[in-house]
Image (cartoon, rainbow, N blue to C red):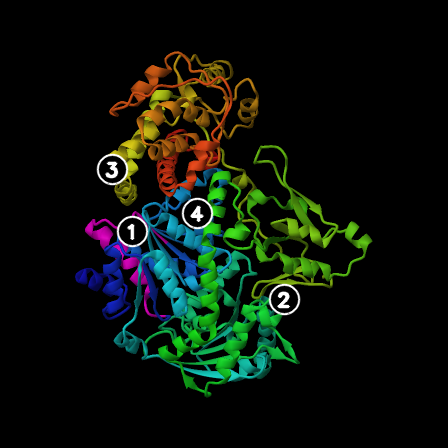
């Protein structure tokens, strides 16, 4: 391992070789021993490579460790930054890295070797409502958790009411099948201890000599008993790189205009940029690239960045001067981590008060509701303010002082919070179990309150086609509601509104049908929508400062007519449709089985974990996966399914057909074929649940219940992760012989029991409360569905390049 570390750390060093810290080696050794860990290390201590090195080492040595890394961060900016900063080094290790986020859904099914994503994406996949793909495909990304190595960076940012309890439930439910590493720079000791106990893991902290190596950087800390102004920024910036972090978007925008006016009047040519969430993606990405370059370790440029919390944690940037609004101590230390970040650097940190004219500007950390003395968030702000005031001006920030600040401000409050979470964890377990069974997870309760709305800026709703992917800006839903309420329009003005629109989706199942836009007649209507279209007369967009809402209507010339651009052309935006080529039942099953076997190397650790848990050999688990694949389409051997497919081939396609089929010829890009297929004459009935019902008796007699149920669930849900109702089914002549031939090489001879009535498999689905059943079901479903998908993709590539899309998964 020593040689590998030397090679890895030297390869990613910009100049001279870098020796890994002892704690990085310790983390690798403990993880290789199958220990789950909670790592506490200061900002800039190299936690990222401490997390990735064990996986890379195991992959290179072909040792058991994990099938993939799911590296989760609290913010999109952090995930994107980490992906960009590591992808070249990972490529050099012959590892595929991917980025999966809401605005960059590059790996929705978690198929990369190292997947950088957000905590929201991970938890939404876990509870069965993945952001990256359809609800019908929910069991595919969930299956990626089995055999994975999950890293949660900056876990202190998980909310105690939503995300943290859900993540704790995940750790408890999946710990036999998944490795976990939690990392933080600023969690108090009571929280770390509680998580270590819950994980049945170990805590790793830096030794004194390691902390001393990091202490070569120097940061002087000052408290400013006033609210920050543009003049403060202009006066304090004396060359180098100044980072200004404020708590609200509007404040960042107003400071930018104030500061640039001052600098212009003083004749100072300094580049000033703004970064926050209310920007079109391409503008935000441009600023982020500029930040990574301008605030890099080697940079000598002069610049000022005014940002919100989006730069608070995880970004590998360094400023010489940090000016920041007051915020909770744990967030403050994250912000300080962006100043003099690297060894040997010196920096100054100034924290400004949020009090002005007797008013406390504590948003967004403290809501306006409730009594302040009973509000823990308010108490955290007061304690942070008090602790900073007690420090001598110019105090050098040491690791001991950071630890003391965290324990003083957060220790007691976070201890109470984590105790309450642990005490009520059984309630979260029940919530998630019910959600996985019924498919009715509440994202707001289990992951994060969905309080954001996506806004399109355009003067003509008739020109806005969502399939063309118009640029969108995100902001808080209630913030938009309060803005609209403040317009002070009369009832008549609202009734005649032509500036604010919401989408109306068509009732037809044709997903290529266009959305229409209808004007709202009350501000309350926006509370029920995820997307809103605003006229540029109300929503002025500035390429540098982003979205600015205007209470006084602007004329379009004043707003520069800057509207959302479309990322896709009209031709390209037409929805891609899947196409099929005729395929017999046996051809299809044999091909999907072959794809499944080809992909077995991607599930080695999942297979090993399951084999140990079920006291079976890895070969036996592989056999079960092969069996589920071989039997997944038995419902297609029903008389009615075959009758409809044969009728399509002979009547519509004018082709003679005598075989039992899995697929007919079908061109999904042809509107006439789509319309014809929808009719009752040609469209086959459902087959997935029907197949499971037919196999239920045989499967129950052949396998232990904990193995039989996952096999049946994987078959019944290989098209929709929440199917459970079946129609009656009668099997056609030759079905038994086809099943026997499709099982070639497997030691089974199942019988199919035809059903004459409808069934609901509620009892079968209820077994998902059992953690072992859930894990094996997710594993089998992922393998089956990805093998089925790969089979059709290959055939479509051969079929004139037509592409299969996620419609296949619904």
Residue at x 31%, y 26% (from the top left corner): 702
Q: CA distance from mark 1 to mark 3?
A: 30 Å
User: Would you call the spot at circle 4 few (<14 residues within 10 Å), some (14-19), or many (20 or more)?
Assistant: many
Q: Any magenta on residue 67?
A: yes
> Is residue 131 among what the camera can see?
no
Q: Which residue is mark 3?
A: 616
Q: Which residue is mark 4?
A: 126
Dot 2 falls on a residue whose secondary structure is loop
Q: CA distance from mark 2 to mark 4?
A: 33 Å
Residue at x 35%, y 31% (from the top left corner): 708
Q: Which residue is mark 1?
A: 95
Q: Any magenta on residue 666?
A: no
Q: Is residue 600 placed above or below 261 in the rendered structure?
A: above
Q: Which mark is residue 270?
A: none
Proximity of marks 1 and 3: CB atoms separated by less than 8 Å? no
User: Would you call the spot at circle 3 few (<14 residues within 10 Å), some (14-19), or many (20 or more)?
Assistant: few
First along the sequence among labels 1 and 2: 1
User: Would you call the spot at circle 2 few (<14 residues within 10 Å), some (14-19), or many (20 or more)?
Assistant: few
Q: CA distance from mark 1 to mark 2?
A: 50 Å
Q: Which residue is mark 2?
A: 370
Q: CA distance from mark 4 to mark 3?
A: 26 Å
Dot 3 falls on a residue whose secondary structure is loop
Q: Position of residue 238 (x, y in %)?
A: 47, 83
Q: CA distance from mark 3 to mark 2?
A: 56 Å
Q: Is residue 535 left or right of residue 259?
A: right
Q: Is residue 683 left or right of residue 615?
A: right
First along the sequence among labels 3 and 2: 2
């Amino acid at each position: 391992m020593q040689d590998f570390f030397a090679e890895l750390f030297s390869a990613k060093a910009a100049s001279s070789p870098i020796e890994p810290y002892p704690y990085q080696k310790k983390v690798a050794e403990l993880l290789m021993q199958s220990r789950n860990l909670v790592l506490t290390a200061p900002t800039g201590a190299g936690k990222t490579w401490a997390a990735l090195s064990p996986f890379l080492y195991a992959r290179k040595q072909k040792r058991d460790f994990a099938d993939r890394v799911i590296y989760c961060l609290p913010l999109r900016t952090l995930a994107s930054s980490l992906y960009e900063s590591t992808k070249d080094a990972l490529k050099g290790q012959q590892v595929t890295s991917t980025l999966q986020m809401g605005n960059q859904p590059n790996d929705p099914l978690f198929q990369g070797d190292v997947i950088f994503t957000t905590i929201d994406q991970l938890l939404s996949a876990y509870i069965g409502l993945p952001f990256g793909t359809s609800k019908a495909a929910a069991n595919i990304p969930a299956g990626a958790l089995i055999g994975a190595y999950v890293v949660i960076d900056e876990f202190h940012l998980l909310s105690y009411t939503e995300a943290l309890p859900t993540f704790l439930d995940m750790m408890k439910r999946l710990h036999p099948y998944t490795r976990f590493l939690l990392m933080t720079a600023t969690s108090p000791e009571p929280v770390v201890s509680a998580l270590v106990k819950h994980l049945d893991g170990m805590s790793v902290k830096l030794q004194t000599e390691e902390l001393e190596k990091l202490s070569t950087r120097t940061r002087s800390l000052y408290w400013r008993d006033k609210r920050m102004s543009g003049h403060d920024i202009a006066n304090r910036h004396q060359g180098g790189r100044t980072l200004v972090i404020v708590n609200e978007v509007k404040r960042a925008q107003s400071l930018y205009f104030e500061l640039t006016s001052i600098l212009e009047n003083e004749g100072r040519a300094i580049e000033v940029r703004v970064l926050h969430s209310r920007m079109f993606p391409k503008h935000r990405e441009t600023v982020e690239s500029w930040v990574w370059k301008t605030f890099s370790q080697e940079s000598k440029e002069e610049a000022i960045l005014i940002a919100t919390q989006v730069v608070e944690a995880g970004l590998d940037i360094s400023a010489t001067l940090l000016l920041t609004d007051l915020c909770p101590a744990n967030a403050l230390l994250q912000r300080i981590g962006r100043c003099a970040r690297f060894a040997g650097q010196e920096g100054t940190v100034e924290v400004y008060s949020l009090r002005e004219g007797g008013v406390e500007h504590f948003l967004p950390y403290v809501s306006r509701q409730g009594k302040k003395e009973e509000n823990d968030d308010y108490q955290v702000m007061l304690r942070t303010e008090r602790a900073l005031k007690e420090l001598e001006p110019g105090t050098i920030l040491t690791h001991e002082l950071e630890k003391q600040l965290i324990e003083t401000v957060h220790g007691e409050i976070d201890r109470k919070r984590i105790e309450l979470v642990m005490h009520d964890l059984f309630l979260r377990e029940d919530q998630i179990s019910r959600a996985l069974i019924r498919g009715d997870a509440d994202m707001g309760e289990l992951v994060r309150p969905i309080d954001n709305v996506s806004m399109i800026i355009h003067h003509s709703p008739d020109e806005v086609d969502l399939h063309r992917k118009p640029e969108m800006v995100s902001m808080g839903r209630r913030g938009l509601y309060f803005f609209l309420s403040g317009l002070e329009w009369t009832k008549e003005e609202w009734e005649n509104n032509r500036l604010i629109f919401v989408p109306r989706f068509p009732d037809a199942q044709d997903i290529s049908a266009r959305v229409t836009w209808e004007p709202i007649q009350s501000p309350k209507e926006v509370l029920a929508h995820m997307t809103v279209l605003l006229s540029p007369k109300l929503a002025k967009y500035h390429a540098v400062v982003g979205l600015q809402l205007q209470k006084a209507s602007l004329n379009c010339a004043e707003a520069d007519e800057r509207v959302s651009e479309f990322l896709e052309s009209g031709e390209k935006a037409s929805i891609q449709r899947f196409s099929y080529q005729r395929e017999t039942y046996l051809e299809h099953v044999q091909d999907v089985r072959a794809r499944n076997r080809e992909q077995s190397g991607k599930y080695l650790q999942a297979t090993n974990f399951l084999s140990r848990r079920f006291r079976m050999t890895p070969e036996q688990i592989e056999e079960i996966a092969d069996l589920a694949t071989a039997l997944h389409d038995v419902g297609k051997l029903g008389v009615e399914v075959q009758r409809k497919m044969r009728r399509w081939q002979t009547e519509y396609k004018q082709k003679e057909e005598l075989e039992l089929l899995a697929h007919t010829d079908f061109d999904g890009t042809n509107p006439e074929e789509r319309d014809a297929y929808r009719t009752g004459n040609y469209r086959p009935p459902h087959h997935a649940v029907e197949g499971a019902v037919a196999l239920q008796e045989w499967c129950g007699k052949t396998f232990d219940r904990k193995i039989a149920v996952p096999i049946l669930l994987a078959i019944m849900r290989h098209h929709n992760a929440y199917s459970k109702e079946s129609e009656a089914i009668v099997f056609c002549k030759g079905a038994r012989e086809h099943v026997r031939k499709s099982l070639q090489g497997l030691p089974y001879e199942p019988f199919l029991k035809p059903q004459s009535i409808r069934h609901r498999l509620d009892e079968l689905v209820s077994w998902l409360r059992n953690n072992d059943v859930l894990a094996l079901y997710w594993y089998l479903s992922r393998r089956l569905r990805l093998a089925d998908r790969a089979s059709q993709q290959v055939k479509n590539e051969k079929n004139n390049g037509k592409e299969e899309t996620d419609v296949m998964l619904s």
